[in-house]
Amino acid sequence: MLYLPIFVPLIAAAAAFFTKSNRVRPWIAVAGAAAHSAIVYRLLAFPAGGADLSALGGWLRLDAPGRIVLGFLSVLFLLCSTYAPGYLAMRPERDNRVFCANILVLSATTTWMVLSYHLGLMWVAMEATTLASAPLIYFNRNQRSIEATWKYLLIGSVGIALALLGSLFLSYAAIKGGVETSLLFDDLTRVASKLSAPWLRAAFVLTLIGYGTKMGLAPMHTWKPDAYGEAPGLVGTLLAGGVTSCAFLAILRVQRVCRAGVEAGFVRDILIFMGLFSMAVAAIFMVRQRDFKRMLAYSSVEHMGILAIGVGVGGPALYGALLHMINNGLTKGVLFLSAGNIHRAYGSKSTDQVSGALKRTPLSAALFLIGFLAITGSPPFGPFVSELTIVAAAFRRGEFVAGGLFLVLLAVVFIGMGGTVLAVVQGEPREDRPPNGFRDHFTTAAPIVVFAALVLLLGLYIPRTLESSLREAAAALDVKR
């Protein structure tokens, strides 16, 4: 059954590509995403959550962290696909053949990435997600979108090349250590204490830089402002919630090998530093940011930093990081989709031209404001719980400087982001930006409302099944020598 969530979206992608009707293709994407979600639910419903499911000689495996990411991705793609018909109906001038097909291809490649339990296969799957997502960024087909696409491809290609080099170094660490092993993660973890320490350190640094580029950790984040700023809100959601989560999972699996070896302190220090640096860079660029879609890109950089800090601190913070990955992805769905609606209503994404959104698009503007409160860690939303879990774990484990800086940077981000969001939603619409006919309607608002409801739910109550799965995944990743 592990092949089904990969091949079913690919079959649906082929059907969408060869369908002639612009109106029908988005609904094929919805059907493909629904089928994918049904298959994923069936996989997760197996005894022990499907922990022992494997295929291809163990190269594909649904482990505990993979169950968390795969379940989240199925929800993300399903909600985004339900937004697509309403959005694409407003863009009849654009042929959506490639767009609809690539949404489904991206669903398949991200699933492949999550299920890959072999170091080399995981790298191939990560590169496939890059190739699948690039045409989505270019959907608007203007000078800015093609520039953003090329930046995404070039910077992402450099990152993935460094990740390949890091994978080779990790393999060579086994050779230098005189160990015969495969590139399956369990095998590498089992012999980690015998791996060559210098090569293991070099491997971790290169893989962190490589997959950190796909996550958008600073300073490898430079593709994000352009890609997120020029891509449709639907695509921004998939990138910020889907692709980055896959890259995060890759880093989780590599750091597990390194922690099981002799490099636990080395891994901890680098991850905490990179996390704080990412938060600081994001905070600087969010202050007085006028482009509200680029602001969301820097928000993504900030939250990738929070994930890195959670993994670096370890222990209970690992649980918080996994929960925050879900909370961040769902909240980005609220923010990117509502920002996309506001952008369509005004024909601009600059606060110099966009104001009074609560009066022109009241539902989207209200959801945008709710998304801002959630993503900045305000109660009672999900990110508050996960961020509190991470910072509390940092203080309990003696990381007082990291915990203190974490709180300071959160405050700076709240102030900087709040200035931009309030400028968009408050006030009166500018007279030189007359209404263009866009109005909130069910197909473009309902998925955002569901995203917001899920974010609120995870702030008030974490379902028991999710809670146990998160703890199982955190325990699997928190390897102790």
Image (cartoon, rainbow, N blue to C red):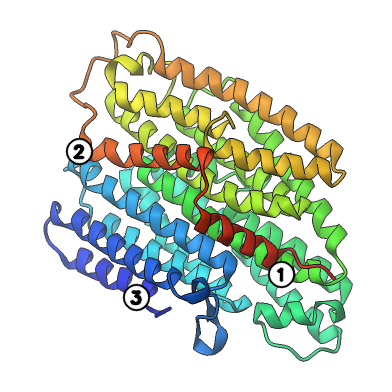
Element marked by disc 2:
loop
* 2 and 3 marks in contact (CB < 8 Å): no
- Residue occupied by mark 2: 90
Q: Residue at x 71, y 77 (%)?
A: 168
* 3 and 1 marks in contact (CB < 8 Å): no
What type is the residue that disc 3 sits on?
A: Phe
Element marked by disc 3:
helix
* Foreground tag (3 vs 1): 3
Q: Residues within 10 Å of mark 2 (few under 14, many from 20)?
A: few
In the rendered structure, find residue 166 and report the number of the disc placed on it.
1
Of mark 1 and mark 2, the one earlier in the sequence is: 2
- Residue occupied by mark 3: 7
Q: Nearer the viewer, residue 440 or 129?
A: 440
Residue 351 vs 110, above or below: the answer is: above
Of mark 2 and mark 3, the one earlier in the sequence is: 3
Q: Residue at x 47, y 63 (%)?
A: 70
The alpha-carbon separation of the residues under discs 2 and 3 comes to 30 Å
Q: Is residue 181 left or right of 232 when viewed as pictured? A: right
Residue 59 vs 140, above or below: the answer is: below
